[in-house]
Structure formats: structure tokens, C-alpha cells
Image: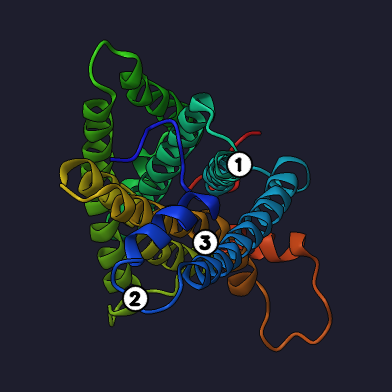
Amino acid sequence: MIQLSTTPLLPSTYSAAGSQGQSNTTRFPDNEIENSTEIILYLLFSLFLFICIFGLVGNGIVLWYLCFLIKRNPITTYVLHLAAADSGVLLTIVVLALTNDFWFLLCFLITYTSSQYLLTAISTEKCLSVVFPIWYRCHRPKYLSALICTLLWNISCLIIGILFLPINRFLAMEIISITNFILCTPTVIICTVLLFIRIYCSLHGRRQGKFYAALLLILLVFILFGAPFSITLIFVFFSALDELHSEYLWTISVMCASINSSVNPLIYFLIGRKKMQRSRESFKLVLQRVFSDNVDCREGRQPV
């Protein structure tokens, strides 16, 4: 079983174990197996670092523009907090790949949980905006985005605080994993299907803004790369897998989580840019096009 205080992302974690597990079933010398395993793991680790650095730069740019250069509205409030949570996920993953600090593991769990909750809140609210547009316009509170974001950060801290209760930490991780999976993954899947049907499959649907297209891609990426981490936690802590297979599964899921936290800025850029535009556009203009081209009520009246 993996330890809660470690994240097996360094190549040295597997080199010895991998060669030991394969030495009895292969014809090649042990040193060749060990060298090949180390090369593969170092390549994977380099790819992992590149993804994290790319994501940190992209989310950092989004944070800069949304904090200082783009007027705040309900959508940018959510996106700002989501970019902050994703940046925290990537930063703590990199630190955990190099150290075995329990407090950074807590920071990773808090930011990852917050990212899941924020994305769930965004998908739920936008789903309501297209399924019940009249009700949404008439009853949406003015400061709802800021209140929800603050509430979700606090809930994430409280849930991860279970690890400090006088119970077994593996039991605490099981509770956290199941809670996050039940609260987020089914909701995101349902909202993704409803948004897709309402926006792209409805014959009488009106044209929606670019943010809905970006949101659908973000939700799809979460289902493919973000949700597997929660599923892996449940599977690892409940299964009878040996330590080597559990660590391999853990590493793959962490790399998927890093992809999930890195790709959002790229999605904003691809959706927001004009395909036929030959001249270079500033990233500010691209973000404004994504976050302003929608029809929600109160969209332009959210205070900073």
C-alpha cells in the first residue's frame, strides 16, 4: 500500500522495484533491465515536468490577466479561482515529486479538491442557465460567484481536515475519495450531457457564447483526466494490489491530474482566437472574447 506522505513520481522510486519484479521472468541481464527502466522513467518524469511547467505558466498568465487587466464578471470570478486551484495542484505535485513532505500533500489535496468543486459549480450554474434561462436571469444573486468560490475553498479545507481526526489515515483518505467522487464526477457528467444536448443538439436552441464551447471541452478533459485520480484513490485504498502496481497506478493518475490542471489556458486560447485572423491577437483580447461572449444576466455587473 502506498504511503500518504509520499508521491512516487521520481524515477528512483521504481527502478529497484521494477528490476526486482522482472528479474525472475526475463532473459535479459538485470543491469540492462534496470537501465532500460530508468531511461523510460526519466523520460516520463521529464514529460511530467514539462506538462506541469506549461500548466503553471498558462494558469499564471490567466491569473495575471483576470486579476489586473480584465473586468471581473461572474464567469471570470469562477475562472480566476479555478486557475488558482489548478496552479496550486501543479505546484504541489512538482514539490511532492521531489520531497516527501506531508504538508505539501495536504496542500495538494486541498487544491485538487477545490478544483473539482469549482468546476462542478461552474458546470452546474451554466447548465441551469441554458436549461432554465428565465428562472436563472430573474433569480441569480448578484454576488453568487464570489460566495460560492469562498464557500468551496472552505469546504475543501474542512474535508481534508478529516486527516487530522483521531482515525486511521487510510480510512480518512477513503472517506475523502468517495466523497469527492460522489459529489463531483456524476454531476459533471450529467451537466456535460445536458449542456451538449441543449446547445448543440437542440433544433430550436439559440447560439450560445464561446465560453460554453470552452466549458464543454474543459468538462470532457476533466472526465478523461481529472476524475481518474479520485477513482484511483478509491481503487488503490480498497483493493488488494501489491505495492508496485499501486504505485504505478498512482503515478499514472497523478500525471493525468497534472494534464487536467494544465490544459484549461490552452482551451481558452483555442476557443477564443479567430481562426481566419492572420494578425496576432493579444491574449487579453482572446480571453475577453471567451468570457464576454455569453448571454447571462448580470454578466457585466459583477463587482471586483
Q: Residue at x 68, y 55 (%)?
A: 53
Image disc number at residue 98: 1
* Circle nearer the N terminus (3, 2): 2
Secondary structure of the residue carrying tag 2 is loop
Query: Callout 3: 10 Å neighbours few (<14), some, many (20+)?
Result: some
x and y, in percent, of residue 285 in the image: 74, 64
Q: Is 221 or 285 nearer to us in this picture?
A: 221
Image disc number at residue 26: 2
Figure label count: 3
Q: Residue at x 61, y 66 (%)?
A: 266
149 lies above or below 75: above
Left or right of 131? Residue 161 is right
For the residues bearing labels 3 and 2, Cβ distance under 8 angstroms: no
The answer, for residue 192, to whether it is visible in the render is yes
| C-alpha separation, residue under disc 3 versus residue under disc 2 | 59 Å
| C-alpha separation, residue under disc 1 versus residue under disc 3 | 42 Å
Q: Nearer the viewer, mark 1 or mark 3?
A: 1
The residue tagged 3 is: 294
Q: Is 262 or 194 nearer to us in this picture?
A: 262
Give the residue furthest to the top.
Answer: 166
Quarter of the figure that contains the C terminus: top right
Left or right of 160? Residue 91 is right
